[in-house]
Amino acid sequence: MSVSPAELVGDQLSEDERRLLAPFVTDLDAPIFGLRNLPEVVKGALFSRYSRSDKSLRRMLLDEFISAPESGFDAIVGGAAATDAAAQLVAVHQAEAFYERVLIGYGDDSVAELGGAHIACEGVSNIAAKALEDSRIGISPLEKSTRYVVFNRKVGGRYRYLRERRIMASGHAARYEEALDGLFDTYGALLEPTIAYVRARTPREPGTSERAYASATRAKACDLLRGLLPMATLTNVGL
């Protein structure tokens, strides 16, 4: 059964969303696409969120940048407010805190290296991701992180792993899906007990917010369980 690129990443765009995104991406449907008409500060902040979110890059650009008033996106990229130089300057200053918060909260050396790189590869297997990353000599790509993102979400009732057409056309298809479904079932079943175990072993320290503690303990649980995820697991890579 063929699967559309949107189904691979679990994302559907409305006509209004497609219209908003069209100026900034080279393709609205393909799993591999480029960014355009975006300043480096926006691309850096966008990619800094990429590795720690379950959203596709197009969805993240819509939800957390284009539709976020505090981002100052419209003025920065040349929207209506940009026709007024003073208004644009104010918008840029207002947006600085937003982008600084995103970059400090989620950025690392790999984000700093993305100044001239703006291609997203979505719904690719971990095998393909490693091949892409190994070709980037001297530059760190950003991949959807198994340390920070839970990978047990289903799309259309199916776990998100590669169903390679030759395997699925062979006599091994049923056993292949059974084996990989079993890995994802186990991963999902162990997630909450592992989080509870981590919390029992590492109580929240005074001064640590509940939100930060929940995020840290979930990340530790994901780190402990990610060995269950097969190389066929679909991921996103920013180059």
Image (tube, rainbow, N blue to C red):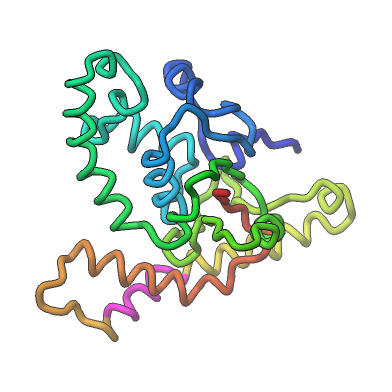
Residue at the image point whose x is 82% and y is 49% from the top: 168
Quadrant location of the N terminus in the rendered image: top right
From the viewer's perspective, is residue 105 above or below residue 147?
A: above
Q: For residue 39, what is the image quadrant?
A: top left
Residue most extreme to the right: 170
Side (left or right) of 231 relative to 20: right
* Tally of numbered discs: 0
Residue most extreme to the left: 207
Q: For residue 7, what is the image quadrant?
A: top right
**x, y percent for residue 112:** 43, 55
Q: Main secondary structure of the magenta part?
A: helix
Residue at the image point whose x is 41% and y is 51% from the top: 48
**x, y percent for residue 153:** 49, 52
Magenta span includes 192: yes
Asked whether 41 or 194 is in front, the reply is 41
Range shown magenta: 190-199
Asked whether 86 or 191 is in front, the reply is 86
Residue at the image point whose x is 51% and y is 58% from the top: 151
Asked whether 176 or 205 is in front, the reply is 205
Side (left or right) of 150 relative to 209: right
Magenta span includes 97: no
**x, y percent for residue 84:** 22, 15
Residue most extreme to the bottom: 201
From the viewer's perspective, is residue 202 above or below residue 119?
A: below
Asked whether 140 or 125 is in front, the reply is 140
Residue at the image point whose x is 42% and y is 20% from the top: 20
Q: For residue 60, what is the image quadrant?
A: top left
**x, y percent for residue 221:** 41, 73
